Amino acid sequence: MVSKKHWAPTASVEVGEVRQSATGAWVVSGRLAPNGICPECGAPSRQRHGWRHRRIEDFPAQGQAVWIELKVCRWRCLNSDCRRRTFSDREAAVATPYARRTSRQAQLLGHMAHAAGGTPSERLLRRLGIRVSDDTILRQLLRAAQVVPPRARIIGIDDWSWRKSQNYGTIIIDLERRAVIDVLEDRDVVTCTDWLRRHPEVEVISRDRCGLYAQAARQGAPQAEQVADRFHIVQNLRMAIEE
Ligand SMILES: [Zn+2]
């Protein structure tokens, strides 16, 4: 039997009620387990200062969006040296402080953006019950890129579609960690060369076989070895056979 706790994004959320709104979306009311540790100074508090109400989107269910109406405890910081008077509990495993979606949904958007790009992800996610714009998906990808350690030895560089087949940027991937390191807003030799100059730690660059990234790698990272990636080798072979 499915109990209410299955609607909680993590065990720290106690679910009170689950209902379906007029539009079909599920609304889960819940409360974050009180914690009372000041994020500024780390002092514990037992003096409550009301509640903060958050509304965050979680994984969809039955093809419908799931909204979590989360009550988060507010506290007074009792440390007189702390510059923060009040604070509300935070739990990054549920959602980061001002996020509009749960951390697990944000991660999913990042993975989708990485695998499929902005607009295809928007369409796929819509069919799964997550209505999100391609801009939001891309912001998520960039946010995920910023928490990845920046020193990569072996990178992949390729073009990447901001809008399907119209607007191309450049995606740079750490091939050892399988993580996006950066997304450049265009596919321009100068932009890529600049990026590579700022990353002298790069030893191997895997790239497509067109001239742009090869030229950028020659200029920006002469120390690095260039290799053609498997996808483009197979693609070139197929085209040669077809001709
Ligand atoms: Zn404090």
Image: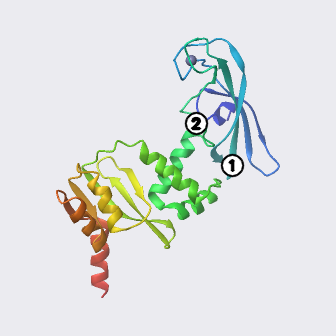
Q: Quadrant of the C terminus?
A: bottom left
The front one of 62 and 110 is 110
Residue 131 in the figure: left or right of residue 158: right
Q: Residue at x 54, y 41 (%)?
A: 104
First-in-chain label (1 vs 2)? 1
Q: Residue at x 52, y 17 (%)?
A: 42
Q: Which quadrant holds the N terminus? A: top right
Q: Report which residue position mark 1 lands on.
A: 65
Task: Indicate which disc residue 95 carries.
Answer: 2
Residue 15 rendering spot, x and y as whole percentages: 70, 30
Observer-nearest of 240 and 2: 240
Cα separation between marks 1 and 2: 17 Å
Residue type at mark 1 is Ala
Q: Residues within 10 Å of mark 2 (few under 14, many from 20)?
A: many
Residue 214, picture quadrant: bottom left
Residue 217: x and y, percent? 24, 63
Displayed quadrant of residue 184 = bottom left
Q: Is residue 220 left or right of residue 42?
A: left
So how many labels did they put on this image? Answer: 2
Above or below residue 215? Residue 122 is: above
Side of 129 where 120 appears, left or right = left
Front position among marks 1 and 2: 2
| SS class, disc 2 | loop
Instruction: Name the quadrant where ligand 1 sits.
Output: top right
Marks 1 and 2: CB-CB under 8 Å? Answer: no
Check the image and name the residue furthest to the bottom. 243
The three-letter amino acid code for the residue at tag 2 is Ala
Mark 1, secondary structure of its residue: strand
The x, y position of residue 205, in whole percent, is 25, 59
Indicate yes or no: mark 1 CB to ligand 1 under 8 Å.
Answer: no
Q: Position of residue 192 (x, y in %)?
A: 33, 62
